[in-house]
Amino acid sequence: MKNKLLSAILIAVCSFSLLVQAGEMTLDKGIFVTETNIEAIMNQGSREFFGDHPVTDEFLFYVAHEYGQDVLKKIVENKDYSDPKVWYMITGKSIHVLYDEYASFVGLDAWDYSHVHHIKNEGKNVTFVFSGDVTIHEGSATTIHMDEAGGIKNCFSSDLMDIMQKADVFVVNNEFCYSTRGEPTPGKTFTFRADPKRVEALKELGTDLACLANNHVFDYGEDALSDTLKTLSDADLPYIGAGENLREAGRVQYYVAGGIKVAIVNATQIERSTTYTRAATDTQSGVFKTLDPGNCVRSIRQAKKNADICLVSVHWGTEGNEYYGGDQVALAEAYVAAGADAIIGGHTHCLEGIEYMGEVPIFYSLGNYWFATSPNMPGDYDTGLAVISISPEGRIIPSFVPAHFHGGVTSLLTDDEALRVYGYLESVSQTTTIDKKGKIKRR
């Protein structure tokens, strides 16, 4: 099998030839790879060094051909076979990105690329922007206002729209189902459903990923959830957090930007004391639940085996409580231990504190972003966007974009009003400060 894979590589890459002379393999185009270097890397490289991937010497041949004759030599000269950052240092790409390229090149059947997205960022920081709760359900005050105002673009200030649309990845907490089928969940106070054509409004915001792990996407039952998944798929809008079974609901979306790979996981703690929203199982549809952190922890661990950075979006906490609770902290601890690099929360309908847990920034809740529960327009509320900016080498830079909802429109805040929101967030946070530009720093 090994020889067949190697032959496939050698034949496919420009039909170059392989010569073995005095222990040295010579490939045309000036690539020189010694058996000694291959053996040193294969014999001494740790699982961590190889990113937990099933690396073979064929992979090393591929890297040498694609990234130059000195790559393997430099790895050996570096003499560090435990730190996977060596790959990025030498090639400009992480071991996860390199192995993705190799697996695609040789056509590994087990490698799934259907949920890997490539971002062109030309060596700049890549920005992942997360919103709080959004709903476009029929008959709500915000949806009525949107129709009267001529579209969802008129429900956000132009400068805020600019931030959403220019984000490399804009992630929305989609708190409703897309369907014309189903009946409201018996006994549930608020149930949210939108005509499937409303998906175009989400796309107009610049949405790149819809998070469905919440307590409203199952409001109209199994058929409506199925319609939701189909509506998003037909609109070419990726989603996470719900599915036709547990495997789909816990699916991870990956983003490759420059030389690093980023994973996003989505789960919901809600509901905690009721079962209106069905949890996905091996045989039935539902949402990706994390009341028990087990499934989400496994998903995070799997994501970190395939990516450099894992971002977790979670629906948790107590509605109306501006102070995050011990249950949220406990889940955050489990996620961080599993490998989460940043956590972004929602559900409480109000802003909660922003903290660091070790090196991991946690936005406990972004609150409502554009949200109404009835035909009556809700009162004003502060809100905002969580921004996770990632440098080319994988450094996380968190920040917060302050905004305010009024009369059906969410607008960017600047100057004194922005400072007011920063001050509030600092007052409900213990470990962070926010500077005048919204950058979050540890106290």
Image: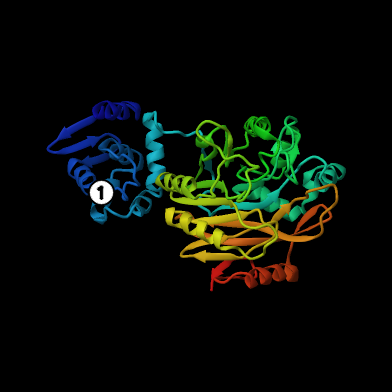
Q: Position of residue 39 (x, y in %)?
A: 19, 43
- Work out whether 385 lies above or below 192: below
Report the amino acid beneath label 1. Gly
Picture quadrant of residue 185: top right
**Closest to the observer, 328 or 93:** 328
Please provide percent x and percent y for residue 84. 34, 52
- As drawn, is 292 to the left or to the right of 201? left
Residue placed at 68% from the left, 32% from the top?
224
Quarter where residue 319 is shown: bottom right
Vertical position of residue 242 compared to residue 443: above or below: above
Vertical order, 418 against 217 (above or below): below
Picture residue at 54% right of the left edge, 71% below the top: 431
Residue in the foreground of this view, choosing between 283 and 334: 283
Relative horizontal placement of residue 151, taking residue 71 as reference (left or right): right
Q: Secondary structure at mark 1?
A: loop
Query: Residue placed at 81% from the left, 42% from the top?
Result: 151
Q: Position of residue 227 (x, y in %)?
A: 67, 30
Callout 1 environment at 10 Å: few (<14), some (14 to 19), or many (20+)? some
In front of the other: 408 or 315: 315
The residue that label 1 is drawn on is 45
Q: Is residue 178 left or right of residue 316?
A: right
- For the N terminus, the image quarter is top left
Q: Is residue 317 visible?
A: yes
Residue 199 coordinates in the image, percent (x, y): 71, 37
Name the residue at 14% across, 38% down. Answer: 23
Residue, far left: 22
Count the marks: 1
Query: Nearest the camera: 362 or 278?
Result: 278
Q: Is residue 202 left or right of residue 287?
A: right
Residue 395 seen in render: no
Coloration mode? rainbow
